[in-house]
Amino acid sequence: MSKAAIEGLKPEILWQRFYEISQIPRPSKNEGKVVEYLRKFAKEHNLEMKEDKVSNIVMKIPATPGYENVPVVVIQGHVDMVCEKNKGTVHDFDNDPIKLIRDGDWLKADGTTLGADNGIGVAAGLAAVTDDSFVHGPLEVLCTVDEETGLTGANNLEKGFITGKMMLNLDSEEDGVFYIGCSGGLDTVGLFDIQYTEPKPGLETYELMVTGLKGGHSGLDVANGRANAIKLIGKLLNRLSVLKFRIAEINGGSKRNAIPREAEAKIMIDPVNEEKAKEIIDQFVEDTLLEFKVNDGGLEATLTKLEVKPKKVFRKKFTRKIIDVILAMPHGILAMSPDIEGLVETSTNLATIFTEGDILRIGTSQRSSVEPAKVEASNIVKAVLDLAGAEEISTGDGYPGWQPNLDSKLLKFSREFYKKKFGEEAEMKAIHAGLECGILGALDPELDMISFGPTIQNAHSPAEMVNIPDVEKFWELVKGIISEIAEENK
């Protein structure tokens, strides 16, 4: 469907910009094509533009005549997207455009992530260039890179790259909510030297797969009770241990900030035990759905015989060790906020497991709105890895949280406009996810920020979708807040 999916949608200019962005491959750490699009866009519209060493871009939009002296407002979003696809979907994220599909009031993609996170926010910034239906002071459209896999753009932004002291971060995903705080994050990774041996004669190779799960954002969806495919395959392998199998390879998950939807293991077992193995698997699915049938009821587990036989398998003790690590590794909510009802304060995500030659790599991520709690969550994970004898344990630099400022002038303008425009109060929330606001606020403590956006569901998964009516409301909100600031300060 693609272009036809946005025909007739309002606001037309925003949807057109989103369509253009969606046709440009933009995986994290490989945003060169979309950065080139932004350069051309700035040139075509005669905008002053700056680009830094990591390809962050800021475009400067001149004020509406008569509003040149009001405060500069920054519109900010990130250009990269999480690249996830369903098994069986043929899509090359480095070269192929996203195929858009309209489904009632929702815009989706065909078997892949949609990229509304944060393509809608970037599209809004670009729409401001040519939409003359609202008055505004000087605007700066800040487009950052590699938010999803390391916050690289924000982390490398130099002081003074933007001049505005009020910023609209358009990277939130809930209509009617202004976000005023976020969690910080940290990655913790363990490496194991795989202990191999030759497989015993008579064993056959099988592929064990866990699929059908929802996955989702490891922060936003952690409270939704969704299953983790790596945890499930660990539990299933533990049940199959009575058959004395050996692992040849195990892989699961794909991104540090996504709950794993799928996991697979190549195992070798005596073929006389094939039917018994399938009975165990069927019982496992039945038992597991008792726990997840409401929140994640699509679980499938299959065992398929393979013709190719591996030349080596994990040793018996190493097989047991890896199963135990998966079973022991914490995943999910560690603490709820005592201050904000319903807010997850601290969590950890068992994100990935990969067999890479002679190395087994286990990746996790921790989040918390309390800095010491984030560090302690990482320490818990490191303790599990250390007890299991990981040869190398490492943590990333992490990123800071964003502390709420209830005295924010920008928040006051925004709440007042929202009530005037929509006849109700907007909610104020903190989010259990990383926003670039934390880093940008640390770079410039004078920066006054809020974050908001239209309703986006299932971000970071192929089920991602954005609510079409909410996008129109979102654009009215962006324009209205900017106009309120201009009129107030004229």
Image (tube, helix red, strand yellow):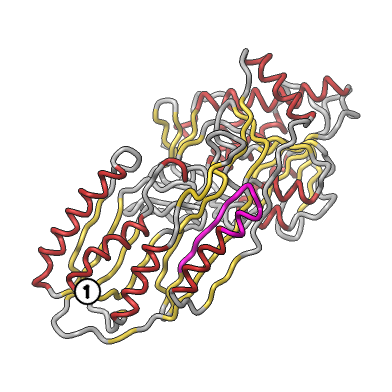
Magenta residues span 362-376
> Is 450 on the left or on the right of 173, as rendered?
right
> Is 264 on the left or on the right of 166, as rendered?
left
Residue 481 vertical placement versus 242 (above, below): above
Rendered image quadrant of residue 414:
top right
What residue do we see at 17% from left, 59% from top?
Answer: 280
**Between 480 and 350, which is closer to the camera in this rendering?**
350
Say if the magenta span includes residue 369. Answer: yes
Q: Tell me where residue 100 appears, x and y as whole percent.
A: 45, 38
- Quadrant where the C terminus sits is top right
* Residue tagged 1: 245
What residue do we see at 40% from left, 68% from top?
Answer: 325
Residue 262 vertical placement versus 7 (above, below): below
What residue do we see at 62% from left, 23% from top?
Answer: 426
**Between 305 and 188, which is closer to the camera in this rendering?**
188
Q: Amino acid at mark 1?
A: Phe
> Is 323 on the left or on the right of 177, as rendered?
left
Sort mark 1 into few (<14), some (14-19) or many (20+) by Cα contacts within 10 Å.
Answer: many
- Quadrant where the N terminus sits is top left
Say if the magenta span includes residue 478. Answer: no
Residue 131 vertical placement versus 221 (above, below): above
Residue 383 appears in view: yes
